[in-house]
Amino acid sequence: MGFVCLIAGILLGAVRGYFTAHDTRSISADLSSVVRDQENRLAGADARARTLQGNIDAAAAQDVSPEVSVALAAADAQRSNAQLDAVTGPAVRVSLDDAQRDDDGNYPAGVNPDDLVVHQQDVQAVVNALWSGGAEAMTIMDQRVIATSAVRCIGNTLLLQGRTYSPPFVVTAIGPADDMQAALDKAPGVNLFRQYVSRFGLDYEVESMPTVVLPGYQGVVSLTAAQPVR
């Protein structure tokens, strides 16, 4: 028994010594620095990919066979359906934010911290409601949503197409504003989030906008499977 207590004391001392020598704030700062570095690398890779894709497109447009020209024309005709072109029109913008701290920088006492932040399912509920309400094009933050876009949250940050975002999370959708608003009002997931807004002080705002411009998707569209056209 004495040996077990001795080992426990050594472990506690080692842990205390580690956190004394390593400020947890500096550890968080190091993690934030890693995230920023990776985002910068991703931005550079995206820029290079767009340049290379432009070179490929320019080369493909030169001296191609009639069959290839027809295929390229058919692909260009689908750019809008693939969310690759900018779109302008009336829109609904939804903003979701974590609960705010009080004047002393504290959250309400006795509350589960998970109840005070926006979760993945909350953002997804808004996205699904807008699509069901007739949205024709959508962005989450500054990213155009395409068929392969996935909403994922890590802690209280949003991971979308390789980039991370902090709240408030903003979703903008072009389409019939009244129908999209009605879809938001009756969506179970959105209504559940609004209950948390009322109870814990999270933020949910909806704004109708007469006209907005949503950029086309700028990333690389990867082909994972294909079949020859007969």
Image (spheres, helix red, strand yellow):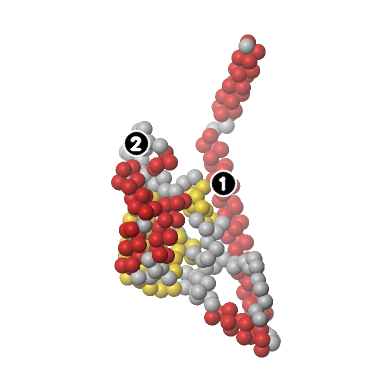
Give the camera-side residue of 46 and 175: 175
Q: Identify the residue shown where x is 43% and y is 41%.
A: 114
Residue 125 x %, y %: 42, 56
Q: Quadrant of residue 78?
A: bottom right
Give the camera-side residue of 21 and 57: 57
Work out which residue is located at the far top of the displayed protein and give it.
2
Considering only vertical position in the picture, is 221 above or below 109?
A: below
Q: Name the kind of residue labelled 1 in the image.
A: Ser
Residue 81 x %, y %: 50, 74
- Label 2 neighbourhood size at 10 Å, few (<14), some (14-19), many (20+)? some
Considering only vertical position in the picture, is 191 above or below 6?
A: below
Work out which residue is located at the far front of the displayed protein and give it.
230
From this viewpoint, is residue 15 visible?
yes
Q: Name the kind of residue labelled 2 in the image.
A: Pro
In three-dimensional space, the C-alpha distance between marks 2 and 1, rounded to whole angstroms, equals 30 Å
Q: Quadrant of residue 90?
A: bottom left
Numbered tag placed on residue 33 in the rendering:
1
Q: Identify the residue shown where x is 65% and y is 68%.
A: 225
Callout 2 secondary element: loop
- Label 1 neighbourhood size at 10 Å, few (<14), some (14-19), many (20+)? few
Callout 1 secondary element: helix
Give the camera-side residue of 2 and 20: 2
Residue 214 x %, y %: 44, 69
Q: Identify the residue shown where x is 66% and y is 73%.
A: 227
Q: Quadrant of the N terminus?
A: top right
Numbered tag placed on residue 108 in the rendering:
2
Numbered tag placed on residue 201 in the rendering:
none
Q: Quadrant of the C terminus?
A: bottom right
From this viewpoint, is residue 96 visible?
no
Q: Nearer the viewer, mark 2 or mark 1?
A: 2
